[in-house]
Image (tube, grey):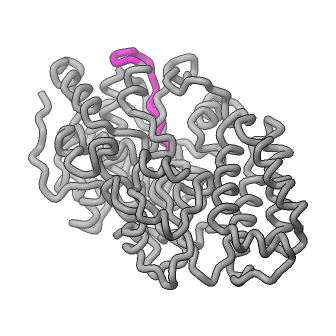
Amino acid sequence: MTTLLAPSETGLLASWTAHHRADLAAHLQSHGPPPVPTRADRAGTARLVAELRASGLTGRGGAAFPSAVKLAAVGAGRRGATIVVNAMEGEPASDKDRVLLTVVPHLVVDGAQVLARLLGARRVVLCVADDRDHTAARVTAALAERAAAGIDPVHVELARPPARYVSGEESALVSWLDGGAGAPRFRRDKAVPLTLCRRPALVHNAETLAHVALIARHGAAWFRSRGNEDAPGTTLVTVSGAVEHPAVHEVPLGMPVADVVALARPNAPVQAALVGGYGGAWLGPRDLATPCAPGPLARVGAGVGAGVLVVLGEHECGVAATAAIAGFMAGESAGQCGPCVFGLPALADDLDALADGRGSTVTLERLWARLALVEGRGACRHPDGVVRMARSALAVFAPDVAAHAAGRACRHDPTASRRHPSPSARSGGRTA
């Protein structure tokens, strides 16, 4: 029967912090053996299910869906299920999945093994985008170590889906694994489980599974000792942009956005921050005191999303930065519905015209109308995210938007913001 370990120096990155090694020996030294009950240990299995439910863990991939609800939907004990580890990280301003699989890959696999045992799953598929060869090599090495040690009851295979923004949406990922085109499916109810090879599939982000591994070891009370009542636990946040120390930070949910930004040491007065990634929202200075948690951020029109903060310095043009992001998002369409195929390029064109000084009040009026037409009409949430990001920009950067629309000079330097945050702006593997 499994037992709870007494927590010591614990956390998602504890093993790396202690040993600066990603191998199995360092992982076991920090965390002990994988907390996976045997098939005969029904009491241990029931306890783990109860701990996960009591923890209040929500998905860290962007949707913040309750993990226990997903588990219950697939059905504990149903044979033949597949656990899909989503480490695609199509969000260009995010680096947390790469960091996890580079420095603590065994914690992610432990979490997948726990859920595989709870569901009676036959296999685990760990998905890394096909442009992340270094990460895939680290995963391959970790899986070889585990195979040699014989510690995994369920086989783990590595898959390399195409590196597209929408490829990491869970229904698109399962579609690709099932031989499909890898486009998101229209789903009214996310509690209805996806299927892979006609059997249930449980998809979780890499960070979510790392949390599962720690909850299985230390229990729900330990997990809830950080964060707050409505949003327990910690989360990984990639902070980049106008900062001296872009990095992936582990922070308690509920920490003020401004305090998370401060961890990366802004190199200029902060004009705004993009919270939640490219499908998130810009927050101006007055809203940066908002706790970084789903409820408080929702009240200011934002969300935790994939755990992303992009800091905009006072010298940068928010209109130009928004236009660059919208252009990128328009090019990442799955190509299966009008709001993406036609709506997003139209939005990007209007924003480009405003940013370049080619726009007018007519352009701005047309942009507002198009935002209303696109919202809520896509097969997935991709266009809705662009609409949210663009609307927040029009509000936060309102004086600059008005100047651009009137043909006046912008008070910022547009050339400093014409590139959207890209892998070159990521943490480079640095962790706080």
Q: Determine the residue positioned at 76% across, 44% down.
A: 372
Where residue 407 appears, as percent x and y from the top left, is 86, 77
430 or 406: nearer the eye? 406
Reply yes or no: does residue 79 show up in magenta: yes
88 or 71: nearer the eye? 71
Where residue 295 appears, as percent x and y from the top left, is 42, 45
Instruction: Reply above or below: 122 against 394.
Output: above
Q: Determine the residue positioned at 77% across, 53% down.
A: 330
- Res 64 quadrant in image: top left
Where residue 251 appears, as percent x and y from the top left, is 33, 60
User: Which quadrant would the N terminus be assigned to in this image?
Assistant: top left
Reply yes or no: does residue 56 show up in magenta: no
Position of residue 379 in the picture relative to residue 124 (left or right):
right
Q: Determine the residue positioned at 53% across, 55% down.
A: 276
User: Which quadrant would the C terminus be assigned to in this image?
Assistant: bottom left
Instruction: Reply above or below: 155 against 105.
Output: above
> Is residue 110 visible in the rendered structure shown here?
no
How many numbered tags mark residues here? 0
Q: Which residues are magenta?
A: 75-86
Instruction: Reply above or below: 30 against 162.
Output: below
- Res 254 quadrant in image: bottom left
Q: Determine the residue positioned at 88% across, 68% down.
A: 359
Where residue 283 appears, as percent x and y from the top left, is 54, 63
> Is residue 120 visible in the rendered structure shown here?
yes
